[in-house]
Image: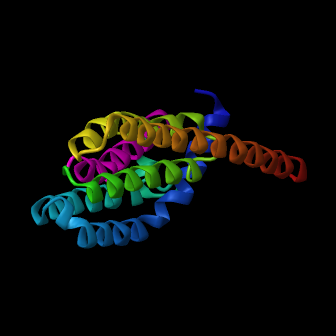
Amino acid sequence: MQPAEIRSITESMARRAPQWRSRIVIAAVVAAVSFPLTSAAFAASWFVIYAGLQLVERHLHPEGALAQRLSPQRYIAACLAIIFFNNVVFSAYGVAEIMSGSMLGLFCGAMVVGGVVINAVMMSPGSRTMVVVALAPQGLYLLLLPYGALQAGLSTFDTVQLTFAAGMLVIAGLSIRSQISRLFAQMQDARAQAE
């Protein structure tokens, strides 16, 4: 991995780590509002697991004690692992909604997974590796969307349309990432010239 990529991952973690409280609050709201589409037990279990991941991630701030104890390679691996598992777990709620068999669950779940796509892109400017790791679960989860749509009673045509829209969301996210990465690189260049 190139030094610029390592720096980008480290900077992304510096931006992400302090947001652990807000991510827990968002998860609490999702679980509290959406549990009728899954179940109270699923929502509570999901929330506990996700909140636990946030408590781990907060210690991965580049200046944190855990980051200081790890070698640079292990630190980067830990960062990528926590981002991957955060996205797997958060999006799992959307998948549970998609697979609920209800039209409301289908659309709410697709929006949850879509929101994670946008968040992954916005929080990882400059780091292609981090974006790929963050988007991998959503790509796999969105493959379940056609099955959930058919299970909810949508026609084949409607299922194709919904699947196309979900794919366009991922493409739009990647386009946003490209734009943000260019702006981020320009800012880094300007900062380097100023120093």
Q: Which of the image's four quarters has the N terminus?
A: top right
Instruction: State the residue in front, 140 or 108.
Output: 108
Instruction: State the residue in front, 3 or 152.
Output: 152
Where's residue 187, x and y in %? 79, 51
Q: Residue at x 81, y 46 (%)?
A: 186
Give the overall secondary structure of the magenta segment. helix
State whether residue 150 is above or below residue 40: above
Instruction: State the residue in front, 72 or 192.
Output: 192
Q: Which residues are magenta?
A: 71-99
Query: In the visual, does 179 lie left or right of 20?
Result: right
- Reply yes or no: does residue 180 show up in magenta: no
Picture quadrant where residue 104 is located: bottom left
Instruction: State the residue in front, 64 or 106.
Output: 106
Where's residue 68, x and y in %? 46, 50
Query: In the visual, does 74 lie left or right of 147?
Result: right
Farthest top residue? 1
Q: Residue at x 26, y 36 (%)?
A: 147
Where's residue 106, x and y in %? 30, 51
Q: Is residue 62 visible?
A: no
Q: Residue at x 62, y 35 (%)?
A: 5
Query: In the visual, does 156 lie left or right of 44?
Result: right
Q: Is residue 6 visible?
A: yes
